Image (cartoon, helix red, strand yellow):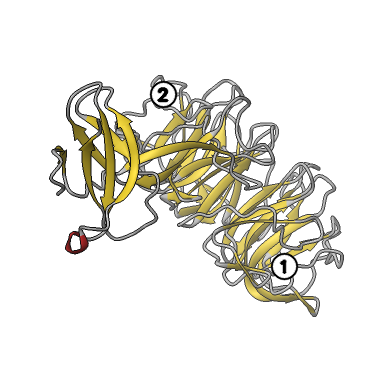
Amino acid sequence: MSDTRANRIMGDFARALMCALAIEQLAHAQSIDISFNPGSGPNRDPIVLARHADGRIVIAGYFSQFNGAMRSELAVLHPDGTLDPSFDPMEGPNGIVRWVLPQPDGKLIIAGDFTAVNSLPRQFITRLRGDGSVDIGFPSVTFDGSLRAAIAQSDGRILLAGFFSQINGTNRSNLARVNTNGTLDLSFSVPGGVVGTVNGLARLFSGKVLVFGSFASIGGFTKSLLARLHVDGTVDTNFALPFVNGSEVTAAVEQSDGKLLICGEFTSIDGYSRIRVARLNSDGTLDLSFYTPFGTDIRPQVATACPDGKLLIGGSFSFVSGISQNYLARLNGNGAFDSTFRPRLNGHTVDFQVEVDARILVCGGFSAVNGTNINRIVRLTSGKLFPPESSLLSARLYPAVFLEGATGTTYRVEYVNSLTNAGMWTPLTNLTLPTTPYLLLDTTWTNSRQRFYRALTLP
């Protein structure tokens, strides 16, 4: 130290993790919507998203808590991501909820791998009241097997697919429909049922339904992996199914023009290279105008259509069209990878919804999005980065020291990178001490390994 009396500096290199905060707009075409705040989110992976007519969000899956509150497999969120305390399923189902079907009256039909809800016998499907309690007006539906897929039709009736031969004692081979009151819909029957596995069901604008999976026949017809059914359950033979060289279809969605995006484990359709992603025309023929070169490295598990004609795919993949893109990607209308959509998730995607304002609600097994800790559920913007009048703060780390001395006295603060060469002190700043102790940030620091400081009293 100099012969001149120096103020005591608390810590020779106080690399306090102090942040100089600067307003910064991020240059992503999609960013985290900071108005959506789920807190710590679910404590385990959600499986499915749905939305009530009033905008509230329903999530279901493996979790037992949401943002620290007990919620067994099921939770309802306000549109801003906070938990809706008015919905509490209490003990809830004794197994995983895989499908949620909100009803116009605010009730909720759930389906999954459970046999009881709040200790009441309820096998695979039941209805809950708006507060989360079991609606005993919806009877217990009895299966002799298991459930694989469920969707609600526009009139509220529910299609069920799985491994079963009877529902409520009536013969139904792997595919059936129940009325809104839970009784079996006798007007729907698939002669011969389904031979093989159904992965999912897609409701079409025409009222017909698309059935997809790894089955070999349906309704008495040899239909591999994909089929379209009439409203009564009979096979639509006008749907000209192409030859799919693969083992299963894992996701399917209808676009507004009636074309069908399909994803799965396949490498070609009708002899054309189509690796895990393809689009069919409304009549079932391959749409040659849609092509995703190299496809994806792992089959997508979920897909949806955007209002602008683009398509979202999600799952556990790491590459799309040979380009590194993990878990969530967007395709242009011609199938090409949309390079303007590059969210960075550190875990797989299991479900998503495109909202009316083009924002995208995503859930899955991630704990970080775009470098920010976001646990298993996030909403992304599309185009606009943040709500009006808002901005993000970016942080830069600086070393800092506490100066303790006489308030109102002016000091010369200097630094050196090594005490073995203490003759090379470099002036940092002159400072009139406004208070004591005073925290001083060293904004000249450039990632050197260490820095030592001293303060000299000026005349």
Q: Nearer the viewer, residue 270 or 40?
A: 40
Q: Position of residue 221 (x, y in %)?
A: 74, 66
In this figure, what is the number of numbered marks? 2
Q: Secondary structure at mark 1?
A: loop
User: Local crowd at mark 1 within 10 Å, few (<14), some, or many (≥20)?
Assistant: many
Mark 1–mark 2 Cα distance, whole angstroms, equals: 43 Å
Q: Residue furthest front?
A: 459
Splitting the image into 4 quarters, where does residue 383 fall?
top right
Give the numbered dot on residue 223. Answer: 1
Q: Amino acid at mark 2?
A: Phe
- In this rendering, the answer to whether 114 lies above or below 154 is below
Give me the residue at 56% from left, 64% from top.
197
Residue closest to the eye, 459 or 36: 459
- 355 and 37: which one is in front? 37
| Residue shown at 21% from the left, 39% from the top | 456
Coordinates of residue 5 in the picture (x, y in percent): 13, 38
Which numbered disc, 1 or 2, marks the residue closer to the eye? 2
Q: Residue furthest bottom?
A: 271
Residue depicted at x 43% and y 23%: 84
Disc 2 designates what residue? 87
Q: Amino acid at mark 1?
A: Lys
